[in-house]
Image (spheres, helix red, strand yellow):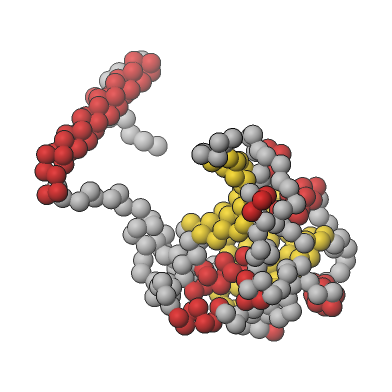
Amino acid sequence: MKSVPRELSGIRDKVARRRVVLEEKAVKKKDRREARKSREKERERLGSEAPPKQEPRTLENTREHDETIVQRGDEAVTEAEQVDEFAGVFGGEVTPKILVTTGYRATRVTYEFLKDFVAVIPNIVYYKRGQYELKKIVKYATSKDFTDIIVVREDHKLLTGLVHCHLPDGPTAEYRLTSYLPSGRIRNRGKSTSHTPEVILNNFTTRLGRRVGRMIGALFPHNPEFRGRQAVTIHNQRDFLFFRFHRYVFSEAGERVRLQELGPRFTLKLKSLHGGTFDPAGGEFEWIQKKDMVTSRRRFVL
């Protein structure tokens, strides 16, 4: 509970005390505004001799150093990505074919998410889970030339996770799924078309981040139909992956452009990346979030 300043504690009337607080806030705000104007005038007077502006400290610009951050022009990483599991898709040689299913005893909330999700990703097919084990689903999907399997999980009618397995040999990524907003609840949303969207992978800077980004990007064909003016963005910020789907809307003269959201929105948080296909005992974890891991708010892995 916050303590009340001594000068305010003597004001018994609640309305009067609130009025004094608001007046003090207004005075402080005015002082800050005047100080900012004064600094700007001083910078104009000094011109090129003015000291550089001091950027506010944020979690991003005070991030702990990570030796796995990929530098521009890193030939070793570029060469490795040219022969990794996703190279065929990014090179246009393989067309993704996705099988999506649910956990056991799925409810309406999962099917609502799947309806939105299937409308975004081209060449995706829903199969009812039934009582099939994931190993059998992997075997079936591989025999039918599927390139990926996605399993949407829920718990007590709440979406909790998403598992993504790349076929035929992995890797398998497990995510926590949060902040789902259905397309129908997005204000002034547009309606998507069947055009293949452009894919934007933003801010995946470490080796693990680039691998995860490429794995997600490999769900989409990399021959976008720009006529549809649609774009899927997966933006990484502080290891949270924000999924957005938009359309470019141009003015009649073509001089202005704006974004119209199509939906859905949701957020993913990586829990683990495993080298195999739904079999943690049969392969090595490339990365796993440990419960007892000592973490810093300024340490990011993606």
For residue 104, say whether it is visible.
Answer: no
Dividing the picture into quadrants, the one containing residue 279 is bottom right
* Picture layout, residue 96 above or below residue 14: below
Where does the image place residue 251, in percent across and percent down from the top left? 57, 36
Say which of 13 and 127 sits in front.
127
Q: Residue at image x 80%, y 47%? A: 108
Say which of 253 and 115 sits in front.
253
Q: Residue at image x 45%, y 65%? A: 300
Q: Residue at image x 23%, y 48%? A: 53
Say which of 270 and 23 sits in front.
270
Say which of 184 and 11 sits in front.
184
Tell me: 137 left or right of 173. right
Where does the image place residue 280, in percent across and percent down from the top left? 68, 78
Tell me: 164 left or right of 241. right
Quadrant into which the N terminus falls: top left
Tell me: 47 left or right of 74. left
Dividing the picture into quadrants, the one containing residue 138 is bottom right
Where does the image place residue 281, in percent across and percent down from the top left? 69, 82
Q: Residue at image x 28%, y 29%? A: 29
Q: Which residue extends farthest right?
A: 130
* Picture layout, residue 35 above or below residue 114: above
For residue 36, say whether it is visible.
Answer: yes
Where does the image place residue 273, in percent across and percent down from the top left? 60, 73
